[in-house]
Image (tube, rainbow, N blue to C red):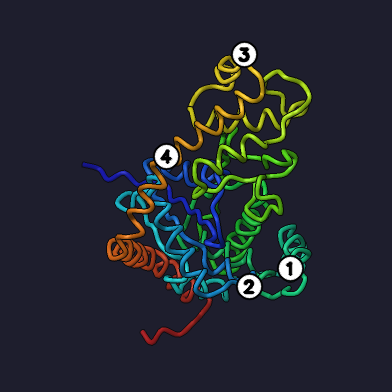
Amino acid sequence: MEEIHKSKLFSAIQPSGAVTIGNYIGAIKNWVRLQDEYECFFAAADLHAITVKQEAAQLRKNTFDLMALFVACGVDPEKCVLFVQSHVSAHCELTWVLNTITYPGELSRMTQFKDKSARHAENVNMGLMDYPVLMAADILLYQAALVPVGADQKQHLELSRDLAMRFNNRYGETFTVPEPYILKDSGARIMSLADPSKKMSKSDENPNGFITMSDDRDTILRKFKRAVTDSDSQVRYAPEEKPGVSNLLTIYHVFTGKSIADCEKDFAGKGYGDFKLAVGETVADALAPIQQEKARLLKEKDYMNDILKQGAENAFRTARRTLSKVYRKVGFYSGE
């Protein structure tokens, strides 16, 4: 029987603290679907995380927690390569080579570099500037044809494409030039419950603005009850006119699987109080089994470590093939 070759896809999340339902909807939930359609490489991007100062013990805990969450959400290590970024040294090695074809002006113009430099003015380090080159190495190592991206990562992916083409032009065909995989689901961008003009983020100064994957039922219900709506009383989807209500409808739509139109019908003639309570209960009900499974996996440390060890070995094999080709192309002596 003819072997079917699937396109490769790479995606990663930083283990830098709490994971929000926005991260779940925009990334992890989609990973579960994508792992059946593509040859997927999914990672905890701990190398990226240290561009902002981290407490060592907390970073270790966050990394293990994040990997347990991936598996609890349905990311299957039998269907994809699941690993911790720092366990595969080729990420750093390829970054160095790519640095030699990257221009300072390209990196200084990156929007995320400017934003993070402003937020962390006391620690504007070279890693923060070089972040997009490491991201390019992440993607190009695995010859990923597709990369799921949100609006805030499009600029970084464009640099990855530029570097792939620049290297190929200089040294010969080496890298697959990655294409963005734009998530069609309207739930790919979840906004703050406290300020629906901003994307939901764990760094929000208002803790009522985001729901984390570890929030308990009472916390989830309380935050949704406090969610910003508007002076109108009609539950309908109109992002420009009613951003708060539209954001809640989007969340309800994603967690129930119903169309937006059917979601609107569920709340026809009902007030915002009933609406916000229903959204909160739906989210809490959906997160409960994930939280239970994650708690179980955190106790199964040997099992999780075996998954990460196997994932790193699988990632290393693919990454090493690419890196060996790169080293040969640039002229590094191998002794052969």
- Mark 4 highlights which residue? 33
Disc 3 marks a residue whose amino acid type is Ala
Q: Earlier in the sequence, mark 1 or mark 4?
A: 4
The residue positioned farthest toward the top in the image shown: 269
Please identify, in this view, whether the residue under mark 3 or under mark 2 is nearer the observer: 3
SS of the residue under disc 2:
loop
Say whether residue 170 is left or right of residue 238.
left
Answer with left or right where residue 41 lies relative to residue 46. left
Q: Mark 1, mark 3: which one is toward the viewer?
A: 3
Real-space CA distance between mark 1 and mark 4, rounded to the nearest whole angstrom: 36 Å
Q: Earlier in the sequence, mark 1 or mark 3?
A: 1
Q: Disc 2 or 4, which lies upstream in sequence?
A: 4
In this figure, which residue is indicated by the disc labeled 3? 268
Q: Nearer the viewer, residue 267 or 94?
A: 267
Q: Amino acid at mark 2?
A: Lys
Q: Secondary structure at mark 1?
A: loop
Q: Quadrant of residue 220?
A: top right
Between label 1 and label 4, give the one nearer the viewer: 1
Q: Residues within 10 Å of mark 4 (few under 14, many from 20)?
A: few
In the foreground, 121 or 137: 121
Q: Residues within 10 Å of mark 1 (few under 14, many from 20)?
A: some
Marks 2/4: CA–CA distance: 33 Å
Q: Which residue appears at 48% of the width and 61% of the height?
A: 44
Q: Secondary structure at mark 4?
A: helix
> Which numbered disc covers residue 53?
2
Give above or below for 4 relative to 302: above
Q: Residue furthest bottom?
A: 335
Task: Using the numbered discs, state the Cα–Cα distance from disc 1 to disc 3 in whole angstroms.
Answer: 46 Å
Residue placed most toward the observer, 11 or 224: 224
Dot 3 or dot 2, earlier in sequence: 2
Residue 101: tell me if it is visible: no
